[in-house]
Image: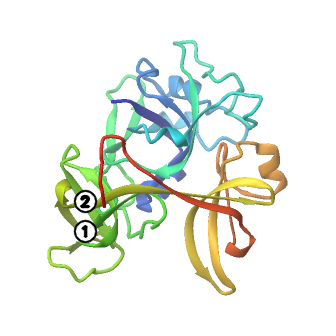
Amino acid sequence: MNYFQKALSPAQVEFLVGGNRDTVSGFVVNAGDAVHARTPEDMFAVHGLDFPSTPWDRAAGYVDVLRFQVPLSVYVHDAAGPEFVDRPPFTGTGFAAWSGGVVPVYFLDECAIPPGAELWRIRAGQPEELMAVYFEVATGWGVSDASGISRPGAHTPSHIMGWSAVWQGQVFRADLVDEGRSVEVAAPSDPGVEGFERTPKGVWRRTVGLGEIQDFYELLATCSWQGEPFRITDVAQGEDGQVYRLFYTGHNADRAEALGLNKADAGVYWTVVQASQAQDVQVIQNRLPSLAFRG
């Protein structure tokens, strides 16, 4: 099984783990390609962290990395020019500037974190330390008592991002668990069905057998705004009607900055717009090839 690795700054760790968030995006490498990178110095080189205004501090003596199962290929892109235009740590070569080996660099569009993702702390001369684990959409994050990370809070996941399961005629956010034999279904409020319990994340959960599921899919909602491509990552009701949270999928920093998009990380741009301003809205259902449901 292939795993990606992404460096997280202290602020990103608090936002993701402390905030009990469940999506990830940005520059990543295959963890197997970087297996010999074992020090903070290596992490700075492999992940290109030493750039102007970097949120990573060499004096901290550590770098935190998130390791997670590689998501669907539709979200993964080779980080190489000229089609891909970005700022540091982007080099344009498609490879990390690390002397310890050949490490291809990829860019991951925003997508749901796969169950079992782990946050590791890398220090020089010490074993790697497991800081936190992302269990699945209903439970969210669990942290080590010695991690110093804020206890994960409540957070209602987007109903658009991530996997969904149809069970007893209802649609739930869901994740495969128990090595694919069971499905953890989650609801933002009590669905009124026996067997559900409320989690510290603030959602309601129940584990059901895979054979009880009528369908299992992931929504990919896309649109264009101001002539550029985006993924719709959330929908809310605003004062003037429905609004979309959009993740920029054009991978061109010049255009993103010209549009005044918010920058959450290297290469990661987003904005919120009125739904009426979005054009070419399309919604498709992605499915895992290993699962076949007839509905």
Q: In the rendered image, which quarter contains the N terminus?
A: top left
- Residue at the farthest right position: 258
Q: In the rendered image, which quarter contains the C terminus?
A: bottom left
Q: Earlier in the sequence, mark 1 or mark 2?
A: 2
Give how far across and how far down residue 200 sits, in percent: 29, 69
Q: Classify residue 2 as left or right of residue 27.
A: left
Q: Classify residue 154 as left or right of residue 269.
A: left
Secondary structure under the numbered disc 2 in the rendered image: strand
The residue located at (44%, 59%) in the rendering is 21
Q: CA distance from mark 1 to mark 2?
A: 7 Å
Q: Amino acid at mark 2?
A: Glu
Give how far across and how far down residue 80 sits, in percent: 68, 27
**Is residue 34 shown above or below 275?**
above
State yes or no: discs 1 and 2 in contact (Cβ < 8 Å): yes
Q: Classify residue 246 as left or right of residue 85.
A: left
Q: Which mark is residue 205?
A: 1
**Is residue 241 shown above or below 69?**
below
The residue located at (31%, 27%) in the rendering is 127
Task: Name the image quarter holding residue 95.
Answer: top right
The residue located at (20%, 73%) in the rendering is 197
Task: Name the image quarter holding residue 123.
Answer: top left
Q: Amino acid at mark 1?
A: Arg
Which class describes the residues within 10 Å of circle 2: few (<14), some (14-19), or many (20+)? many
**Residue holding disc 2:** 184
**Is residue 186 shown above or below 130?**
below
Give how far across and how far down residue 54 sits, in percent: 66, 41
Please state which of residues 28 and 13 is positioned toward the viewer in this rendering: 28
Which class describes the residues within 10 Å of circle 1: few (<14), some (14-19), or many (20+)? many
Please state which of residues 133 and 76 is positioned toward the viewer in this rendering: 76
The residue located at (38%, 67%) in the rendering is 153
